[in-house]
Amino acid sequence: MAKKQFKAESKRLLEMMINSIYTHKEIFLRELISNASDAMDKLYFKSMQENLGITRDDLAINLSFNKDARTITIEDNGIGMDKDELENNLGVIAQSGSFRFKQDNADADKEEVDVIGQFGVGFYSAFMVAKKVTVLTKKYGDENAYLWSSEGVDGYTITDAEKDKNGSVITLFLKDDTEDEDYSEFLAEYKLRSLVKRYSDYIRYPIKMPVTKRKPKEGKEGEYDETTEIETLNSMVPIWKKSKQELTDEQYNEYYKEKFLDYMDPLTHIHSKTEGTATYNALLFIPKKAPFDFYTKEYEKGLQLYSSGVMIMEKCADLLPDYFSFVRGLVDSEDLSLNISREMLQHDKQLKLIEKSLERTIKNELKKMLNNDREKYEEFWKNFGLQIKYGLYSSYGTQKEFLQDLLLFTSSAEKKLTTLEEYVTRMKEGQDAIYFASGESVAKLDTLPQTEMLKDKGYEILYLTDNVDEFIVKMLVDYDGKEFKSIQSSDADFETEDEKKEKKEKSEQNKDLLAEMKKALEGKVADVRISAKLRSHPVCLTSDGEVSLEMEKVLGAMPGNEMKPKADRVLEVNADHPIFAKLQFLFDNDKEKLAAYADILYDQALLIEGLDIDDPVEYCNKVCALMVN
């Protein structure tokens, strides 16, 4: 019996497929099961065309293994192959009979010809784990059966054989174990079960295998009888291909917890089927709690990707933008362009269309939750709101129109979370800006001296407590035509015209006093000014320019020794406070003590703002000195 050589530069191409194309050796089982499914699809299609009376229920895949012989067997009762098809499909690498079948029946119903194979190389993944592969096959309606056999790049043989029924039996003779490779792991029942569940759970035909069952012996504690039963390993019908009407929330929740190993029900699910320029099924979940590593570099985003029910990627990061990286779930599409190994996506227009469509779907679901179930949305925001904020900031504001209506901030009104839209609708007549304050906590911000006058005027303030918040409002610039203004900025404008006029007059009258205080605080502040922002407090600290006091704190806490940007600090003094009269007296009578007062007031303003003072001991000594004088 003469050995035949593979065509299409056989040795070089086969070596490449065995060693380079597939990342994980375990993929071989997925590929062979997919081929078996294709063979049964072809027979079912033939039955429909020729009224053969064969239904999908008549078709199945049988999987078995033999530890002693070191073999794995995949058997199907599909259409089988004749001698010429063996030559063409298995003797010519990278020629796909399934792909030709799809082309030849392009006008048929898509569901009827939805075979999986495309490239004609999946079969050869078997040689990653097998030193020899045989294929015993008989085509439906033929009398003759054939045995194809190969030990790899050296070629193959085809001989006449005996087989009762149509279909194919593929037998893999596993390689011997080495120091680096444990091929015996594929001869374990649990391993084969897990691979079927992971990669081929939604093959539309049952995948059956003998499974060992242990039952306690009657009357003998600790002893068991072992029996073998044929068990179907796969689910067959994906939950995402069922209609929403068929499924309950409990079924969605159980599927999520089983597949994504979460002990808690998801906050919500999104089940969609999209057809048109981007055709796919999606089943997405928003977890109730953030994973422990969600805000670390170790967290890996991505959706499971299926092609016609076969899992191609465990985590396809390209289907989710970073700001929706908390979403878990899957996408199943028949239209994606896959690379030759089906382990990776080609980055084509179709993929981008699906990503954009998913993005809109997720955003719409969140907006619906915000409008219809506020309590649930606020629970979501507590866990994942920071990711939305980072997404808006990291995109340099390009996504602000898309994401801004999902944002929540704490408001000075009842200390509750509010959207920007809600804030704007509550603005007082004549108010032309959205006022905000940035700091460590809502409690501390609520006691800032600047808030007192705004509250008296009935203005609402947004309290920004996340490090990224102030950078976000810089990106947003405005909302609905209303500019964002920090009440901690020196140019924050919320005084009346009369208050501005009075401030200007007092500033002119006391310009020499202010200059003397600025001199005393040289190197610490950019300026000392009369304030119209204060009611009962003597001083407050604000900033000039683009770098705010809160930004200085955030940037200063970042690692690295490079120069950190500093805010231009401004000490604002309340001319109506009793302390101001004391400052005026000292300016006329004791400039040295005036300098001490200026230092103390500056340190107090730092403490109120949540900033460190330069020398706490010196501050205490100055206060004590004033107390005893």
Image (cartoon, rainbow, N blue to C red):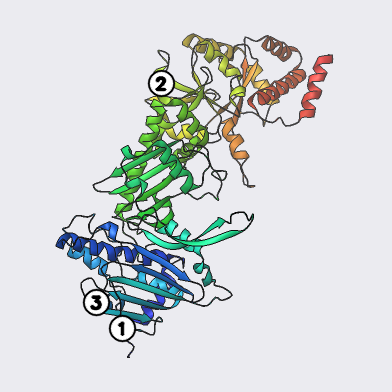
Q: Residue 442 vs residue 41: left or right? A: right
Amino acid type of disc 3? Asp
Instruction: Please report contact status of discs 1 and 2: CB closer than 8 Å, yes or no.
Output: no
Which residue position is annotated with label 3? 82
Cα separation, mark 1 vs mark 3, equals 11 Å
Q: Position of residue 262 (x, y in %)?
A: 51, 44
> Residue drawn at (66%, 30%), measured in percent from left and top?
611
- The image quadrant where one finds the C terminus is top right
Res 8 visible = no
Amino acid type of disc 1? Ile
> Residue drawn at (75%, 21%), measured in percent from left and top?
596
Image height check: is 621 above or below 314? Answer: above
Residue 424 is tagged as 2
Which badge, 1 or 3, is on the more N-terminal residue? Answer: 3
Q: Quadrant of residue 616?
A: top right
- The image quadrant where one finds the N terminus is bottom left
Query: Is disc 1 placed on a helix, strand or loop?
Result: strand
Which badge, 3 or 2, is on the more N-terminal residue? Answer: 3
Image height check: is 245 above or below 321? Answer: above
Which residue position is annotated with label 1? 158
